[in-house]
Amino acid sequence: MIRKVFWAPGWEEKNVGFVFLTSSFTLVCLQDAFVAFHVNKVLVSKYLKSLQIGELAPDQPSIEPTKNKMLVKDFRELRATVEKMGLLEPNQLFFFLHLAHILLLDTAAWFILFYFGTSLMPFIVSLLVLTISQASWLQHDLGHLSVFRKTKWNHLLHKFVMCHLLGASAKWWTLLHSQHHAKPNCFQKDPDIDMHPFLFTLGKKLSVEVSVCACALTYQKLGRTP
């Protein structure tokens, strides 16, 4: 992917969410986006070979002209260092215990309502026992494909936690969160600040800055494909 040029006409018609995501990357270098959004880069590179149409000339830059070259270089080196230190390797025992305590407390909440009825006090106690916020953080990590090495298992457990424990759509969350990490805090790019300027932003000055900025942390890790 580094310094390579690809062409995939009609691909957006076959991939849900492609238009939304690539609207943030139009006519920009996708090297950092590729690294951030793919877990198994070797596998994806294998399928990209048929779409490659050339490479950048030696005198052509591999970053957008609006970005700080030294800042981009520093972030790439930082990411490489973090990966080499193993800081991105998940502790699966932690996630197992995390899910186990969520299931245990949710079961306890339902048992309270079943045994004591649905009057005010049992209802309040059951709300206190419920682990909605904990389940939300767990599904967030699963949606980032950060728990298992295999993408399939992350997706399966993500759907279970998101759809069955939280009652929301896993695909809906993934699409919106992918856009958020593609251009975090950039107005009209990040759906998390779509309520702008009423929520999540402070005043007109910041509103203008985020709408025209080349954000420093443009591509954050959200492994969406193998």
Image (spheres, grey):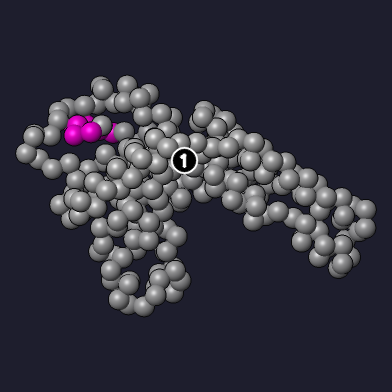
Q: Let me know if residue 65 appears in the view.
A: yes
Q: Position of residue 51 (x, y in %)?
A: 24, 26
Q: Quadrant of the C terminus?
A: top left
SS at badge 1: loop
Q: Residues within 10 Å of mark 1 (few under 14, many from 20)?
A: few
> Which residue shows up at 19% across the image and 45% down it?
63
Figure check: 92 above or below 104: above
Give left or right: position of 93 versus 127: left
User: For residue 22, what is the image quadrant?
Assistant: top left
Asked if 45 appears above or below 192 in the picture, the reply is: above
Quadrant for residue 186, please give it.
bottom left
Viewer-proximal residue, 115 or 40? 40
Residue under circle 1? 87
Residue sitting at the far left: 59
Does 9 appear in magenta? Answer: yes
Number of residue marks: 1
In the image, what residue type sits under mark 1? Leu
* Residue 114 picture location, percent across and down: 89, 52
Residue 141 coordinates in the image, percent (x, y): 54, 44
Q: Is residue 122 left or right of residue 1?
A: right
Quarter of the figure with residue 97: top right
Magenta-drawn stretch, dominant element (helix, strand or loop): loop
Residue sitting at x 36%, y 40%: 81
Residue 119 vs residue 44: left or right? right
Residue at image position (17%, 27%) is 53
Q: Could you say which is closer to the camera, residue 22 or residue 97?
A: 97
Q: Which residues are magenta?
A: 2-10
Query: What residue is rendered at 44% in x and 74% in y?
Result: 198
65 in magenta: no
Of the pair 116 and 100, the residue shown nearer to us: 100
In the image, residue 187 sits, relative to residue 91, either above or below, namely below
| Quadrant in which the N terminus appears | top left
